[in-house]
Each structure stands twice: as structure tokens, then as C-alpha cells.
Image (cartoon, rainbow, N blue to C red):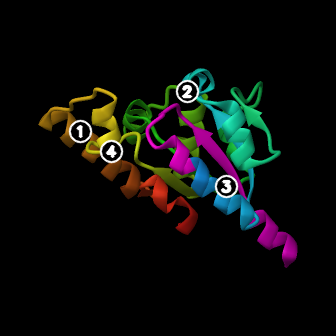
């Protein structure tokens, strides 16, 4: 039975490149690591260029950090993991996942996991229409864009993913 419990605490962290609230997301993931979670990481191309890999390694521990799944499809890469955590989904990625048109290995891993009923947890800070950090970065979303983002988040949630702020990741 202990092995089954260990399996349940294995997760792929899929990082799509949003810098909005990334620090809080890493703190939450570090807390999960302290509670016994083991992580492997799949980063999108943009995440690999925008984010601090050292901070990610420090927070998540000694698992793999991949920017590509190599010759294995992203869906197959994610298959053995019961949980997929997306610590800061980008607006671009949530649009593709909501419309079932994943454009990157990271989005394909998320979409495939949602479609196979896995426990997928998405932190919405990077794609939420209203975070104060978005305005601080110079984004001014019209009412139409805000509505589109809300619709995309609702679709991803209705497809089975749990959507919540990064500050709630450790409690999910």
C-alpha cells in the first residue's frame, strides 16, 4: 500500500511560460515537495527562455526538467503520472487547450491528461483576466478579451481540470 501512496504523490509540472505569480507557484510546489511529492518538469519552449531554471530546480527538487519529450509524445510522457500541475498557465496556452488545439508539447501533455481524466490542476494567475500583476506588466485587457479569457478558463474547468489561483496549489 505504501507504494500506491508514493505513486499518488508523483506529478508532472508543466510550465507554459507565464511569469505572472511564478514565485508564489514555486513556493506552493516547494510546500508540496516537503509533503512528499516528487516532480518531473516539462517546460514549453518559451518557459525555457523566460524563467529561472535554477529557481525551478531549487523549489521542485531533483526530478527531470525537460524542454522536449524527445522521441516520446508529450501525451505518453505524462501517461504514468496521476497528477499534472500547471503552476502558471499562459493566456495563449489556455486558449489552445480550451479549443482542443494544443500547439506545443506542454499544451499537448495538458490536453491529453485532461482528455484521459487525470488529476489536472491549473493555476490561473497567468491567464486570469484581472490579476493586478497583469496591469503592472502593462497589459490592459478590454472587456471582450476579459470575457474570452473567462470563457477559456470555464471550458478548461468544465473539461475536468481544477482551476485555482497559484496561492491555492498546495491545498488542492
* The disc label shown at residue 104, or none: 2
Name the residue tied to disc 4.
128
Give whichever of discs 2 and 1 has the lower sequence position: 2
Whether residue 96 is visible: yes
Name the residue tied to disc 1.
148
Q: Is residue 40 left or right of residue 93?
A: right
The Cα atoms of the two marked residues, 3 and 2, are separated by 26 Å
Segment colored magenta: 1-25
* The image quarter in which residue 44 lies: top right
Q: Residue at x 63, y 25 (%)?
A: 48
Give residue 129's position: percent from left, percent from top. Answer: 27, 42
Q: Residue at x 44, y 33 (%)?
A: 93
Crowd band around label 1 with a 10 angstrom C-alpha radius: few (<14), some (14–19), many (20+):
some
Give whichever of discs 3 and 2 has the lower sequence position: 3
Between circles 3 and 4, the one closer to the viewer is 3
Q: Is residue 161 above or below residue 143?
A: below
Whether residue 9 is visible: no
Q: Is residue 97 above or below residue 31?
A: above
Amino acid at each position: 500500500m505504501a507504494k500506491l501512496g508514493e505513486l499518488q504523490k508523483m506529478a508532472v509540472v508543466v510550465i507554459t511560460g507565464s511569469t505572472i505569480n511564478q514565485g508564489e507557484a514555486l513556493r506552493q510546489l516547494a510546500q508540496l515537495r516537503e509533503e512528499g511529492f516528487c516532480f518531473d518538469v516539462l517546460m514549453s519552449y518559451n518557459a525555457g527562455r523566460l524563467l529561472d531554471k535554477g529557481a525551478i530546480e531549487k523549489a521542485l527538487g531533483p526530478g527531470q526538467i525537460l524542454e522536449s519529450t524527445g522521441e516520446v509524445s508529450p501525451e505518453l510522457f505524462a501517461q504514468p503520472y496521476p497528477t499534472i500541475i500547471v503552476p502558471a498557465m499562459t493566456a495563449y496556452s489556455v486558449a489552445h487547450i480550451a479549443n482542443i488545439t494544443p500547439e506545443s508539447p506542454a499544451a499537448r501533455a495538458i490536453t491529453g491528461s485532461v482528455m484521459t481524466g487525470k488529476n489536472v490542476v491549473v493555476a490561473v494567475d497567468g491567464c486570469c483576466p484581472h490579476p493586478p500583476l497583469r496591469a503592472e506588466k502593462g497589459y490592459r485587457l478590454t472587456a471582450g478579451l476579459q470575457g474570452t479569457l473567462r470563457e477559456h478558463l470555464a471550458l478548461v474547468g468544465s473539461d475536468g481540470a481544477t482551476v485555482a489561483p497559484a496561492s491555492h496549489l498546495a491545498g488542492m
